[in-house]
Amino acid sequence: MSSTVSSQTILSAPLLAHSSLANTARILFAATMVALGILGLIYGDFAVQWQRIPIAQLPGRVVLAYLSAAVELLGGIGLLIASTRPVAARALVIFVLLWAVLLKLPAVIFVPQMEATWLGLGEITVILAGAWVLFASHANGWESQRLSGLVGTRGTRHARWLFALSLPTIGLSHFIYLPQTLELVPAWLPFPTGWAYLTGAGNIAACLGILFGVWPRLAAILEAAMLSIITLLVWGPGLFTHAGDRMQWTAFVISAAIAGAAWVVAGSYRRE
């Protein structure tokens, strides 16, 4: 029975292990988790606004911050090692799910009319989608039997849907918060408003392409590439001009994690 389950699991997985894009994406995503964990250990705190704890005097806050950093660090390292990859993927998907449900979803429920709350949730659910793809691709026999909708081919497909549905929350923010978006566009780029609208529309177009199966692999790759370029152009320079600024490093790493998760989703598609 165990050998049968293992064979079915291998056959139902999206063959991530044989994709150079998938392997590179996993390494990138793992590196961002390691970096996020290191930042947490250095500062003894959560990732600023992305992991904001609403209660400043929460008992055991510092301990929780260090535990979170440890999960990120060890989870990222675990993704780099074949023998620990399934456990690491499992731990990270649970960790990011709790991150989204406990820290981001309440704001959406209480202030649904504010797009910023949806943006905050969407950024984290993109990371969750990437972690989910890795979890779905490295499920064990028990998980394949009991969690068939969450692992294997079906789980990967559902993770792609979550990724796609997260993108409009990011894209719409470019239109609704245009002045704030323009402040992030590098000064040397001409037509900043055009770039803000183009990238916002790009997020929405990628969502539609993935959901409706219109060149979904290309849509996911272009989305991941766009997020990577934004990370480098918007947050990369600050690492040199404000090297000692915690916010710059955190913003860069979180943005890189979002881009890395997008690459993981893109790598889950087989080249046709």
Image (spheres, rainbow, N blue to C red):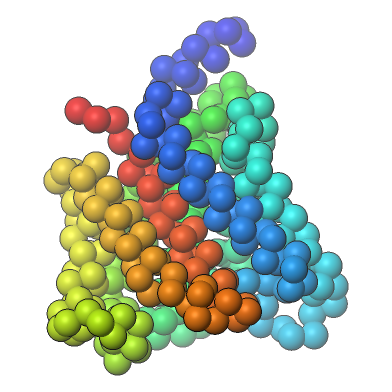
Quadrant of the rendering where the N terminus is positioned: top right
Q: Give the x, y percent position of residue 244.
A: 63, 79
Residue 172, quarter of the rendered image: bottom left
Count of picture labels: 0
Left or right of residue 47, residue 218 in this image: left
Front residue of 233 and 219: 233
Left or right of residue 99, residue 162 in this image: left
Front residue of 215 and 139: 215
Rendered view: 1 above or below 171: above
What residue is drawn where x is 50% and y is 49%? 29
Left or right of residue 271, residue 21 in this image: right
Q: Give the x, y percent position of residue 269.
A: 31, 36
Q: Give the x, y percent position of residue 37.
A: 67, 59
Rendered view: 49 above or below 266: below
Quadrant of the rendering where the C terminus is positioned: top left
Residue 117 seen in this snapshot? yes
Front residue of 69 and 140: 69
